[in-house]
Amino acid sequence: MIAIICAIAVAVVFFLIVSQQSKRLADPKDQTVVYLDDLAPLVMLERGGAFVLNTYRQSGNPYADGKVYETPDAALAAALATFRRAKIDAVAIRLNTANRLDVSRAFFDHRGRAEGKKVGAFEIIRVV
């Protein structure tokens, strides 16, 4: 009986989180959750220096080794290509400054045994 109550509580919390992210995505004024195609104009990375792209799995472990790019546009294009291959449509912007962009998938995929191995986030760090 306790297990059923716990399962229901987890389902309710999951539903509330997904509902909140969906409301943020639908609100054009809220730029914390956006569609992948709308991300590029919002990026505030400054030019100059090199840019390191780190990609992470949903579990938080590294997905790919850090790759160095000469421009923020090249690093962002590589990150977006990875997310498109993973069929991620919406992202949550966790940090967007002149020196760092930190983005994760807006809706985590909870299906299948390989859940933690799927692409979950990327960060682009400006190295001066």
Image: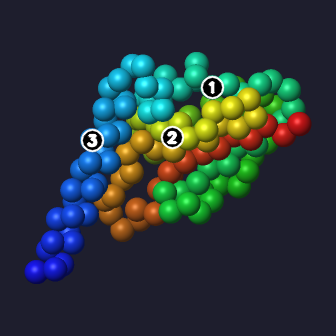
Q: Position of residue 66 (x, y in %)?
A: 73, 50
Determine whether, in the image, residue 23 is placed left or right of residue 127: left
Q: Quadrant of the N terminus?
A: bottom left
**Mark 1 → mark 3, Cα distance in angstroms:** 25 Å
Residue at the image point whose x is 35% and y is 23% from the top: 27
Q: Is residue 83 visible?
A: yes
Question: Which tag is nearer the camera, tag 2 or tag 3?
Answer: 3
Residue 55 or residue 24, whichever sits in front:
24
Give the quadrant of residue 5: bottom left
Callout 3 secondary element? helix
Q: Using the image, tell me which numbered label, if any, was put on residue 83.
A: 2
Q: Position of residue 109 (x, y in %)?
A: 36, 53
* Tally of marks: 3
The residue indicated by pointer 1 is 43
N-terminal label among 1 and 2? 1
Determine whether, in the image, residue 18 is placed left or right of residue 53: left
Callout 2 secondary element? helix
Determine whether, in the image, residue 30 is placed left or right of residue 112: right
> Badge 1 local density, few (<14 within 10 Å), some, or many (20+)?
some
The residue indicated by pointer 3 is 19
Residue at the image point whose x is 30% and y is 45% from the top: 18
The amino acid sitting under disc 2 is Phe
